[in-house]
Image: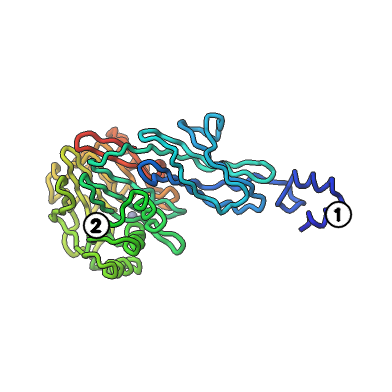
Amino acid sequence: MRIRSLVPVVVAGLLVLLLLSCGNPVSEPAGIPTPSDLIIQLHSDSVVYTSWTQCSDNDFDAYILWRSQSAGIEADPSQAEAIKIFTGDPLQNTWFDSDVTAGETYWYALETRNTSLLSAWSNELSLTIPLNEPDNLTVFFIDPSHGSLSGDAMLIRTPNGFNYLIDGGDRRSDWSCGRDRIIPMLDSLGITHLDGIVGTHPHSDHIGGLIAVLEDIPVDRVWDCGWTGDGSATYEDFLNEIQASGAEYIEGNRGMTLDWDPDLEVNILHPQPNPGSGSMNNASILVHITFEDVSFLFTGDLESDGGEDDVLSYYQPEDLRADILKVGHHGSGDATSNLWLDAVQPSYAAIEVGSGNPYGHPHSELLYRLDERGIPVYRTDQDGTFVITTDGTDITVF
Ligand SMILES: [Zn+2]
């Protein structure tokens, strides 16, 4: 408004003011733009979905999405490529990058520029494009991060093409991991129905996002821990949505064998029937999957006290062995004890955790326990969504 009032008076002055502070109140010097938070996801076997938080600065000018095949774009943009430039509309905050090659790793960063041509940079993220292996067992460890939200969300594609989710991340009034992250991923993979879902336990960061999944696509079966203690509004919504969706409700208990795929052996190791007292985390459904020589163990939020120790007292260590351990409770120090690691003996640790979680997950003592054993760690808060795939012999992490 003040710029307009100056126009008839000092034209030359306007040009100077425009250069210095276009869009800002003219009395204030132009500042650095507010940087965006960048998120990248594998959208399909050969497409990367990028999105970022919107810039609300009134002197916004452009988003420039940079991609490189090495880290450090902000430090040296000359080694990167500006793959997309959006000018003038801060609401344009998504882009599908299909110009990628299987097996290659790409780094992404977003530059936000204002009308004074000043720039700010987002976080930098990397992603490796998986090789398309249709006969593999493939697990997508989906990044549950959104603001302070965390959670678990894993998509399992079996060797014969069946698709299962274990947990679905969290939800809040304006965002759902299910609706905003999982469903777009399923769409891109051509998955129009799920053979089953496991909701490990009633906490919102595990089942919150599953509600939108059940609303959006057909699901054959849902395994729930059958919690009998005090629940929550989200758990009520989850149970109601299972019923409304027409999916078969199954209480998943210790000793059950699941017929997920003729090439897989899938067992539930925990909980015992009718959990309802003690920690809700310790009601988590534990799923152990074996494909030929390779095993995965999915642990929900199982804690050491009252959870892992109960499993250890019931099973022999060889029943728990797994090459890939989905670390319990987002890398909390109260889970994944040394005794647990002695039994499981994982070659890889996968941590599902939100980058902005307020709990300090993963905890340093847990990371130390893994490091002490030389176990490579993959974590969604740092790596974004990552993929582990196996042909039953070899394991590849993307
Ligand atoms: Zn949790």
Name which quarter of the figure residue 207 lies in.
bottom left
**Which class describes the residues within 10 Å of circle 2: few (<14), some (14-19), or many (20+)?**
many
Q: Secondary structure at mark 1?
A: loop
Quadrant placement of the C terminus = top left
> Ligand 1 is located in which of the four quadrants?
bottom left
**Colour treatment of the image:** rainbow
Q: Residue at left 55%, top 51%? A: 92
**Which class describes the residues within 10 Å of circle 1: few (<14), some (14-19), or many (20+)?**
few
128 up-or-down from 327: above or below: above
Q: Residue at left 26%, top 57%? A: 197
Q: Position of residue 355 (x, y in %)?
A: 43, 48
Query: Given the image, on which type of amino acid does mark 2 rest?
Result: Gly
Quadrant placement of the N terminus = bottom right
Q: CA distance from mark 2 to mark 1?
A: 69 Å
Per the image, the residue denoted by label 1 is 8
Q: Residue at left 33%, top 68%? A: 237
Please report whichever mark, 2 or 1, sits nearer to the chain's N-terminal start: 1
Q: Please give the label number shown on residue 212.
A: none
Can you see residue 203? no
Query: Given the image, on which type of amino acid does mark 1 rest?
Result: Pro
Q: Please give the label number shown on residue 196.
A: 2
Q: Nearer the viewer, residue 79 or 132?
A: 132
Q: Nearer the viewer, residue 284 or 43?
A: 43
Can you see residue 90? yes
Q: Position of residue 301 (x, y in %)?
A: 29, 53
Q: Nearer the viewer, residue 274 or 63?
A: 63
65 up-or-down from 219: above or below: above
Name which quarter of the figure residue 216 lies in.
bottom left
Callout 2: CB less than 8 Å from ligand 1: no
